[in-house]
Amino acid sequence: MNYLYNFLIKIVISILLMEATFNIWKMEAGEPGILSWFLPLITIFWIVLTIVNAVQIKKGKKWLKEEEEDERDQMIKYKVGYITCWSNMGLLALLFFFYGTFGIEMFNPVYALALIVFLNIVIYYSMKLYFLFFE
């Protein structure tokens, strides 16, 4: 994947985060919860990272250059992706178990799915750092 496709994927994720932020603000208009404060901060952070990435790519004039990847980075990505995929399956199974056992009154489904997405991101990057520095 070259730098242009990577940047375009980040733009799409930024747009989806902004849409999710506005939908949550609309849902929680009367009583703002923690997600209505936390998600905009993540969105702003992601947009700033995307802009910084675009400036760095433009400075280096490497929009269409391929990203260099060695075998070690590729193997780390495969291991981390495998672990994240199965942890996602486990988290979704736990979510279905809790909804089947305790009912929907326990917590909001939007919060549960957002929590699983954020946990997957944290698991992915923490495992990537672990494999990068400690193995």
Image: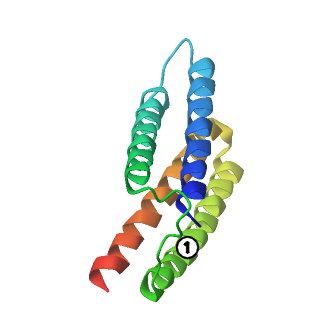
- At mark 1, the secondary structure is helix
The residue depicted at 34 percent of the width and 71 percent of the height is 129
In the rendered view, tell whether residue 113 sits above or below residue 19. Answer: below
The residue depicted at 48 percent of the width and 20 percent of the height is 32
Counting labels gives 1
Report the amino acid beneath label 1: Gly
- Residue 59 seen by the camera: yes
Identify which residue, 114 or 75, lies in the foreground.
Answer: 75
Task: Report which quarter residue 126 is drawn in.
Answer: bottom left
In the rendered view, tell whether residue 76 sits above or below residue 121. Answer: below
The percent coordinates of residue 13 (x first, y second) are: 58, 45
Residue 96 vs residue 67: left or right?
Answer: right
Task: Report which quarter residue 55 is drawn in.
Answer: top left
User: Quarter of the image containing the N terminus?
Assistant: bottom right
The residue depicted at 41 percent of the width and 64 percent of the height is 125
Identify which residue, 96 or 12, lies in the foreground.
Answer: 12
Residue at image mark 1: 81
